[in-house]
Image: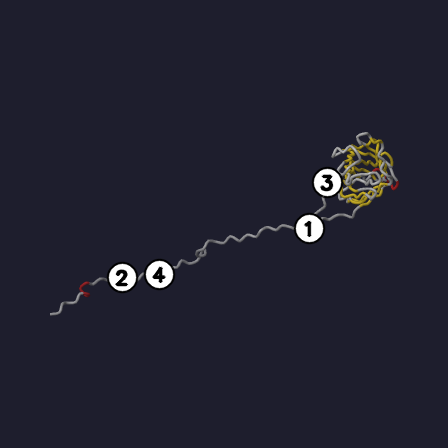
Amino acid sequence: MYNTPILPSPICVTLDPIMMQGDAKYVDTDNSNGLPTTGDLTIGEIYTAVSGVPNQSGGIRNISLDFKSVCAVTKDQFPGAFSSPSCQYEFGFKFCRRNNRNCREGTFSAHGSGPDKIRITGGADGFFGAFGQITTTQDFNTGTVEANGDLTGSTVEMKIEICYYDVLDDSAPTVPTVPTFPTPTAPNLPPVGPPVGAPVIPPRPTRPTRPNNNDADVLPPLV
């Protein structure tokens, strides 16, 4: 039998769409100098929220959201046969409830490939055990595409639906532990011997030695 963590029920929050904007670096891994090929990367160091923040309906206040991403091309691209890359995201997220109380801050990760929903796959700190999904409510806008493939001012609009567990202040889930008991020890026994205060039995008397009577033992010779 295994001990299982004791967790509260998850808390779920749905945000209105938030527009994210940032720049990205294109990495031509095979130096093909043409259309993207398998293994090429687009790395977004930082995308920040530019609309839909800091306040939203439902009493959600002081929203702060950013992400970095690494997107990999998984298929050679040809005109008329383009496909979405597979992307990994790391989000930094903070928000407060009404009256700036019950604030929460932490990180969560996600991955996916458009146009499907992006899956939230974990979190830390204020978003311990995060799960959920992200919907891109508008197509990704590449912004300005530089001659080397870098993106400047690219944007994407995201609707975040996230659930998490209320484990704060570095408090890990409580795991029941098996109580320990002291190891029993044998009692100290007295040394082997007569009990204290027992009567002393005198030694057994020895048998007397028979006297050596030479005269009685020697017979006279026959005549």
Secondary structure beneath disc 3?
Answer: loop
Is 219 above or below relative to 140?
A: below
Residue kind at label 2, given as amino acid type: Thr
For the residues labelled 4 and 2, say whether their Cβ atoms are less than 8 Å apart.
Answer: no
As drawn, the label of residue 204 is: 4
Residue 106 visible from this viewpoint = no
Q: Distance between the residues labelled 1 and 3?
A: 21 Å
Q: Mark 1 points at which residue?
A: 3
Q: How crowded is mark 4: few (under 14 residues within 10 Å), some or many (20 or more)?
A: few
Give the tally of numbered discs: 4
For the residues labelled 4 and 1, say whether their Cβ atoms are less than 8 Å apart.
Answer: no
Residue 221 visible from this viewpoint = yes
The mark nearer the N terminus, 2 or 3, is: 3
The mark nearer the N terminus, 4 or 2, is: 4
The mark nearer the N terminus, 4 or 1, is: 1
For the residues labelled 1 and 3, say whether their Cβ atoms are less than 8 Å apart.
Answer: no
Residue kind at label 4, given as amino acid type: Arg
As drawn, the label of residue 209 is: 2
Q: Residues within 10 Å of mark 2 (few under 14, many from 20)?
A: few
Q: How far apart are marks 3 and 4 (CA)?
A: 82 Å
Q: Quadrant of the C terminus?
A: bottom left
**Residue situated in front as seen by the camera: 162 or 201:** 162
Q: Quadrant of the N terminus?
A: bottom right
Across and down, in percent, residue 8 comes to 77, 48
**Residue situated in front as seen by the camera: 5 or 83:** 83
